[in-house]
């Protein structure tokens, strides 16, 4: 939320960086588990809308958490990805293939995302986030679809485009809300 007369709305609402970090983690779990369960239930037909709405959010949340966890990013993101996959499995054991595909794809994409995000660390959040979202989305899209459904370049490409557009919208929204600077 943009500042009013030099005073952030977040401060007026008494929201601290710890609150935003906790909210980011909870949103991450909700987005990942929901995405996994929707794709498990509806199959390949759900991949594109889920990528746009939920994985675009996931990619951008990784970036906000990257800024908050810069010293422990590998451990913390690894745990988030693992726990998200375990929660998916615990809610619906028949979603195990999607949970495994999600774990492998998110793990690989997070490494790629983090490297690119770090490379652009001196740029604005929008530049850092969108550059890393593109890199992570490429890796995630091709790995996830291939593991979950078999090699499908058209679905992977469409999923990548949906993630890139969704991630751009989410990063713009989080930038406007001053998600990182509360």
Image (tube, helix red, strand yellow):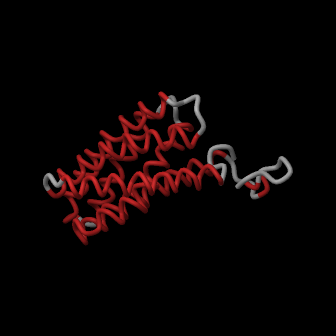
* Vertical side of 72 occupied by 60: above or below: below
Viewer-nearest residue: 7 or 156: 156
* Vertical side of 45 occupied by 178: above or below: above
Residue 119 position, x and y percent, is: 47, 27
Residue 93 position, x and y percent, is: 22, 64
Viewer-nearest residue: 157 or 181: 157
Residue 115 position, x and y percent, is: 41, 30
* Vertical side of 122 occupied by 31: above or below: below
Which quarter of the picture shows residue 33?
Answer: bottom left
Is 104 on the left-hand or right-hand side of 179? left
Is 79 on the left-hand or right-hand side of 66? left
View extreme (left): residue: 150
* Vertical side of 48 occupied by 79: above or below: above
Residue plotted at (23% across, 46% down)? 143
Residue 100 position, x and y percent, is: 22, 51
Residue plotted at (58% across, 28% down)? 122
View extreme (bottom): residue: 42
- Count all numbered tags in the image, as a single digit: 0
Residue plotted at (38% across, 43% down)? 79
Residue plotted at (26% across, 66% down)? 92
Quarter holding the N terminus is bottom right
């Amino acid at each position: 939320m943009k500042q009013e007369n030099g005073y952030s709305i977040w401060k007026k609402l008494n929201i601290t960086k710890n609150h935003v970090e906790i909210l980011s983690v909870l949103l991450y779990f909700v987005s990942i588990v929901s995405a996994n369960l929707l794709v498990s239930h509806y199959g390949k037909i759900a991949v594109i809308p889920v990528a746009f709405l939920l994985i675009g959010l996931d990619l951008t949340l990784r970036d906000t958490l990257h800024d908050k966890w810069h010293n422990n990013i590998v451990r913390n993101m690894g745990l988030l990805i693992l726990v998200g996959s375990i929660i998916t499995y615990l809610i619906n054991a028949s979603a195990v293939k999607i949970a495994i595909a999600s774990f492998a794809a998110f793990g690989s994409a997070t490494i790629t995302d983090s490297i690119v995000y770090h490379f652009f660390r001196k740029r604005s959040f929008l530049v850092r986030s969108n550059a890393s979202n593109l890199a992570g989305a490429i890796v995630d899209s091709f790995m996830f679809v291939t593991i979950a459904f078999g090699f499908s370049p058209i679905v992977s490409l469409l999923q990548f485009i949906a993630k890139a557009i969704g991630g751009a919208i989410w990063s713009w929204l989080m930038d406007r809300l001053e998600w990182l600077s509360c």
